[in-house]
Structure formats: structure tokens, C-alpha cells
Amino acid sequence: MARQKHSRPAPSLSAQGESATSVQIRIHGEANQPTLIYLPGLHGDWTLVASFRAEATRFARFVECTYPQTTQWSLEDYAVAVTRTLLAQGIDRGWLLAESFGSQVAWALLACPSAPSQPTCRGRTFGLPGDEAVQSLKVDGLILAGGFVRHPWPMGVRCLEWLLEHMPDYGVRVGLWLYLAYARIRHRQAPETWAGLHEFVQRRRQPQDRRAVAHRLRLIRQSDPRPVAEATRLPVYALWGWIDPLVPNLWVARWLARSCPGYRGCRGIWWADHNVLATEPREAAVQIQQWLMQAQSLPRQHDHAASKASA
């Protein structure tokens, strides 16, 4: 595989195991089902998605990612690393399920860094720059779960970034204790998610994890993928919880309806918070299944583009 055209070393990849410089994936469900590729939010791992995964595997093959705890990657690095890891495991097509920060990774993936094999693929096929074999990840659609295009409140993101960088250890411990108290009530009907909370808390206690989350906030603040969204014609849906103090989701939906050619619709779920997949996993899964069934009747944009290019 040819080297990446990056000033820093290309990210290493893995399907399992723990590494500071690797993307990990786990695959659940049958290969003959539609594939959902979960791109996690700021926390960067699969610790909060277990209950949704249990629901989603009834109708889809669910592929979940965990990002490395890095402060060096750009959004393009995230996109390339995720894509290469998926292709290495034989996953070459699917829907992106992009949660919060994961939406920025998804837009970076759809932006398609220029490659000899895929020079103008906007929102259809993601080629790996410099690869000798013409390999690509074909995206069937995008579902934003508490996701966004350009974050409408960049100063709010900057405040969270500053707080995370300057919070003392005891502040982190208090914050995690309060979160666990909230989660005990919030996830009482989601036993799989509750079971994963211990791992979630353990990861958040690591100083490197906090630095990585602060870096992801910085990437959000600096990111403006609106030109990509304005050129995207594959199906795009938006799902969110109404109890969300972090993202003004109606604002996001209005912008998508006005500016994104592929936008197909949205749904807000009562009593869900920013982490809609974890707090209302069953409702979220039912809605996503409906969208996948609805999209089956739509033409595959990237297939049409590929046949047009070869004509």
C-alpha cells in the first residue's frame, strides 16, 4: 500500500486490540443485511452504543469504531484511517451512522481527498489516495445522530475545549460521579449500555483521553464541511433527542433542508438527549430501519456516477 501524502506518519490500523495510533472496529450481525457503520462522538468509542447495537443487529450488520486517543490527527486522517480499516476487514459498502463529532469524520470521508482513481467523487465513493488497486468505500447514505454540518455555536465549542483542558482531576472525578448518577436513571431500561458504563468511566479518567477529546473539540471548531454537504446527493437523514443542550438540531435540520440536495428528512425523539442512540435505543433503531427501507427504492448515486464516468 503506497504511503499517505501527509507531513506526519500515516495512521496505523487494527481491527482489535488497543493502540494510541489505530482505529479499531467490531462487526456484529449478518453480512447479507444492510451495513451500518457507527462513527462515535466526542468520547470516541463504542462504550455507550451497546443497547442500540442489540436493536440494530435485528435488521443490519452493525460495524462499530473506536478512535485512537490521538491529538495529532486531522479530520482527513480520521476518514482515511476508518476507510482503510473497513476495507481491510472486507467492508466496502454501507451507511454511515455519524454521532456528534462523528458527523465531522463522515463529511471528511465524503469530501474524498483527491486520488488518481477517484478524482471527483464528492459524496459517493471514497478512494484511498495512492493505492495501486482501485479500492473504495461506497457510501449508501448518511444518518446524523446528534450530528451537524458546521457547528452553529463555535464559541460554545471553544468554551468546552478550554474547560476540558483546564479542569483539575478532582473536577473530572466529580463530573464522572454526576454522570453516573444521571446514567443510573437515564439507562435503567438499557441494560447493555449500563453494563458498558464502567469501561466508559475508566477511559474518561485517562489524561490522554481528555486531551484527545479536547483535540476533537478543536477539530469541530475549525471544521466547515458546508461545501461538502451542499454537493452531497446521496440520502442524508438527521436523528436527534429533544433534550440536547449541545447542538441546536432544528437549526441543523433547516440548513440541511435548504442547502443539502440529498437531505431526505429528520426525526426528533422525545426524552432522548444528545446521545440519542444510547438514551432511546429502541426508538432510534425503529426510525433508522424505516429510513433504510425507504432508501432501498432510491437510485444508488455512486453507482450512477461510476457508470457515467466509464461511459
Image (cartoon, helix red, strand yellow):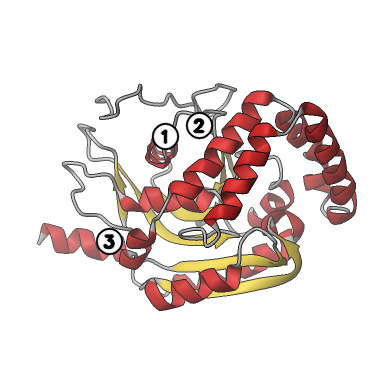
User: Which residue, given by chain and number where applicable, does mark 2 sit on?
Assistant: 23
Report how far apart the C-alphas of labels 3 and 1 lie in the structure.
24 Å
Q: Residues within 10 Å of mark 2 (few under 14, many from 20)?
A: many
Q: Observer-nearest residue: 1 or 256?
A: 256
Query: What residue lies at 84% left-to-right and 55% top-to-bottom?
Result: 186
Q: Residues within 10 Å of mark 1 (few under 14, many from 20)?
A: many
Q: Observer-nearest residue: 139 or 112?
A: 112
Against 305, residue 163 (above or below) is: above
Query: What residue lies at 72% left-to-right and 54% top-to-bottom?
Result: 278
- Labels 1 and 2: the sequence-earlier one: 2
Q: In the image, which is nearer the foreground, mark 2 or mark 3?
A: 2
Specify whether residue 44 is in view: yes
Q: Which mark is residue 81?
A: 1
Amino acid carrying label 2: it is Val
Q: Are marks 1 and 2 in contact (CB under 8 Å)?
A: yes
Residue 114, by quadrant, is top left
Q: Which element type, helix, strand or loop, lies under badge 3?
A: helix
Residue 263, by quadrant, is bottom left
Amino acid carrying label 3: it is Asp
Q: Residues within 10 Å of mark 3 (few under 14, many from 20)?
A: some
Q: In the image, which is nearer the foreground, mark 3 or mark 1?
A: 1
Q: Which mark is residue 303?
A: 3
